Image (spheres, grey):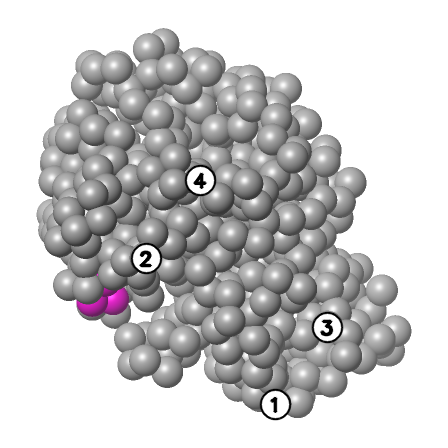
Amino acid sequence: MKLQIRGGRVIDPANGIDQVTDLFIAYGRITALGEAPDGYTPDQVIDAGGCYVLPGLVDLAARLRQPGQEHKATIASETRAAAAGGITALCCPPDTVPPIDSPAEINLITRLAKAAGQAKVFALGALTADLKGELLSEMAALKAAGCVGVSNTLRPVTTTLVLRRAMEYAGSHDLTVFLHPIDFELANQGCAHEGAVASRLGLPGIPAAAETAAIGQQLALIEQTGVRAHFCRVSTARGAAMIQRAQYDGLPVSMDVCAHQLYLTEIDIGDFNSLCHTQPPLRTLRDRDGLRQCLGRGSIAAISSDHQPHEEDAKLAPFPATEPGISALETLLPLTLQLVDDGVLTLEEAVRRITCGPAQILGLSAGTLSVGAAADVCVYDPEQPWTLDERSLLSAGKNTPFLGWEFAGRVTHTLVDGRVAFELTA
């Protein structure tokens, strides 16, 4: 199909483009910007007047719950929600059931995503066999099967020697190691930030040092091995500053932050609100503001959803017994663009953090509207307010603390390889 997106404000940070113009698509690729190619006759025209035309969003972390936890969600349900949020490519962590530690799991996820046809799904492979933190996984086979990096997610690695060997193995195959900075002994099975709020509520706390101590150790190993590493979901201002310093010193490291960490704090769990039970936990107001400042300085390359859909029962137990995580695919874009109104980022910087920024971390040729690139496009109307409620969420998980929030704009169309994967209906 030949498709013309007419009269929108095209914002493509990868190419430094911000102008009102037309975008032309043919055979799943972007063929021109501004003037139509010779002999071009579109089969469909999308009127994007007053809208932003953005590269399709790239999300660094979305748990799709398949295989193994289909009672929470499926790849079909969550990629449909991703398309509704303007996300055309997302990365699946390896803590599925069973974990992604062999080509079989990667092939299954790829096949299910292609069958759903709503968004492109890329997988991280397990850093250690079965994510047990003892033996190294077959990283060469995982890379050959298409994994875009390796991680042990929120599972401990038994010793620093195992972690060092894993980094060396990953580096020898040019694989990025995705690290979750948490010292599990210091975290001690806590469920909230160790501070005044957790003490008042009697909740076991996770100190900020559980993150900063892990970052210090991991940075030392990165310097030793030379591996390319990405720090996932940094939650403390001190931790972000440590990684920023390492970047200044020339270490090959990057980091991302969850969208909800830029808004919510420990205060939001004040009435045992299990929808605010996250891992890492919501931190202090000072941490939130410190993360925003680090984001504005450019040290944080990406904003992720850290999407974790749950069934209703998973959030109904006493706070420590509930499962952590937020259903977040459909709020990634509006929360990121709200940072523009808050003066944290410019519009170009905000779009960069959810398009070419994460794409570069994953090593993908995505997040751009370059001529010849795959036609993954998001059309966003900044003047169409809406209120988030359970009925408007397409994700199977309705577990979000942002229910009832009013957002300024909404995705109207999402294209994947030039095909309309989502179109907002009246």
237 w.r.t. 280: above or below:
below
Q: Earlier in the sequence, mark 2 or mark 1?
A: 1
Q: What residue type is labelled 1?
A: Gly
86 w.r.t. 149: above or below:
below
Left or right position of 44 against 229: right
Q: Which of marks 1 and 4 is nearer the N terminus?
A: 1
Q: To which residue does mark 3 refer?
A: 424
Res 317 label: 4
Q: Which of 103 and 320 is in front in this view?
A: 320
In the picture, the quarter occupied by the C terminus is bottom right
Q: To which residue does mark 1 refer?
A: 50
Q: Which amino acid does label 2 sit on?
A: Asp
Residue 418 covered by magenta stretch: no
Res 271 label: 2
- Which residues, given as a range, are shown in magenta? 288-292
Q: What whole-number distance in Å separates the C-alpha atoms at marks 2 and 3?
A: 36 Å
- Pinpoint residue 305: horizontal percent, then vertical percent: 45, 54
Q: What whole-number distance in Å separates the C-alpha atoms at marks 2 and 4?
A: 14 Å
162 w.r.t. 263: above or below:
above
Q: Can residue 175 be seen in this snapshot? A: no
